[in-house]
Amino acid sequence: MTRVYNFAAGPAAIPEWVLKKAQNEMLDYHGSGMSVMEMSHRSSEFQDIIDTTEARLRRLMNIPEEYDVLFLQGGGSLQFLMVPLNLMKKKADVINTGQWTKKAIKETKKIGECNVVASSEEATFTYIPKIKQEDLSEDSDYVYICENNTIYGTKYKELPPHEGKLLVADLSSCICSEPIDVSKYDLIFAGAQKNMGPAGVTIVILKKELLDHADQDKLPSMLSYKVHADKGSMFNTPPTWAIYMVGLTCQWLEEVIGGLDKMQEINLKKANMLYDYIDQSKLYKNNVAKEDRSYMNVPFVTGDPELDKKFVAEAKEAGIVNIKGHRTVGGMRASIYNACTVEAVEYLINFMKKFEEENLK
Ligand SMILES: Cc1ncc(COP(=O)(O)O)c(C=O)c1O
């Protein structure tokens, strides 16, 4: 068996430790005589899985008691709609940093007023706009950001001002990549398929006091955070397998990696190695403002679309897959999430060096 070096943006590489543990437990989960996929979500075994998953995530991220943790379906894309449906009374302030905030803006506008506070679209989203408190609408309910922009490779290093307003953040492509202070946010959401496991489950962490924000009589049940919270994420059949895999990923982060401080150290090491190499290279360029660079998604170009194509093709032959950049940016993108090892990044850099030697005119 040969495993490739997978730099996919999501669904993405999963730690081998997690895959092997899932494999070991596949046919007979803890003496139950069945796999987690075959279990009733109402069984005591599954209740234990979801409780343990939540407890591990709470420990890892240091989630305060006054926050609920939900495991939902519909991806980040459903959160673009659930956030305004549940939190907006009058208006939302959104900072536009790429495709994923544009989609959130589109959905928000269907529910109510949406003010785009700032945007870096004119520069192909290569930086994070810095805003001041006075840029926000006076009557907005919340400020919405995408903390790590998967496609453009930018990341907030500091949260924007949001005095007197709630802060909502899409952490789909950076959750658990570093320690964060959850109490600075009012609602966090993240699809699991980049840093937390397979596709199919979305983690929502929100202040309990927000559950009563919306008029529950008007809100469809499946779109209500309160309904899901009251039922312990089991209002309907939850994505049981995906939740189990998130639990194993949390166990890996806790017991194998040693927590989020350690994970951040490894992630910084990988990102710095790659950016340092790109910055001194005569062939590759990363167009993102240095202070806003992502530690998870590293886009780079050669400046020649034909050469980019050749890079992607030869990389594949060398066992490096899913390195093609998003169609709106072109070039290449290395997604180096938690499961991507230091060794994988070293292997990529060595390939890039060889390609540079062979192709630099
Ligand atoms: C930052 C971010 N938010 C939201 C999404 C949308 O997630 P989904 O496809 O699970 O709806 C993505 C998908 O890649 C993403 O990268």
Image (cartoon, grey):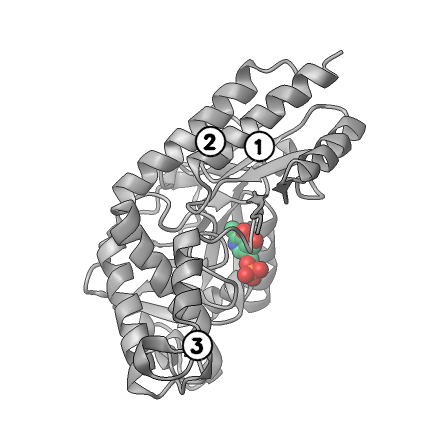
User: Quadrant of the rendered structure where residue 264 is?
Assistant: top left
Name the residue furthest top: 361
Question: How far, Cα to Cα, is label 3 from label 2?
Answer: 45 Å
Where residue 235 appears, x then y in whole percent?
40, 84
Q: Count the numbered circles shown.
A: 3
- Secondary structure under the numbered disc 3 in the rendered image: loop
Viewer-side label of 3, 2:
3
Name the image quarter holding the C terminus: top right
Q: Is residue 212 visible?
A: no
Label 2 neighbour load within 10 Å: few <14, some 14-19, many 20+:
some
Relative height, residue 2 to residue 361 (above, below): below
Give the image quadrant in which the ligand numbered 1 is located. bottom right
The numbered mark at residue 126 is: 1
**Which amino acid type is shown beneath numbered disc 3?**
Leu
Q: Between residues 38 and 202, which one lies in front from this camera angle?
A: 38
Question: Is any part of residue 50 visible from this angle?
Answer: yes
Is residue 41 placed above or below 258 in the rendered structure? below
Q: Find out whether the residues at labels 1 and 2 contact each other: C-beta distance under 8 Å.
A: yes
Asked if residue 194 lies left or right of residue 105, the reply is left
Q: Nearer the viewer, residue 202 or 7?
A: 7
Whether pointer 3 and pointer 2 mark residues with C-beta atoms closer than 8 Å, the reply is no
**Residue at 51 percent of width and 51 percent of height:** 13
Per the rendering, the mark at residue 292 is 2
Judging by the rendered image, the residue that carries numbered circle 3 is: 27
Q: Amino acid at mark 2?
A: Asp
The secondary element bearing badge 2 is classed as: helix
Extreme right residue here? 306
Give the residue displayed 55% in from the left and 26% down from the top: 349
Q: What's the distance in space between the residues labelled 3 and 1, CA to CA?
A: 47 Å
Q: Position of residue 38 (x, y in %)?
A: 46, 83
Identified at 54% across, 68% down, the residue is: 111
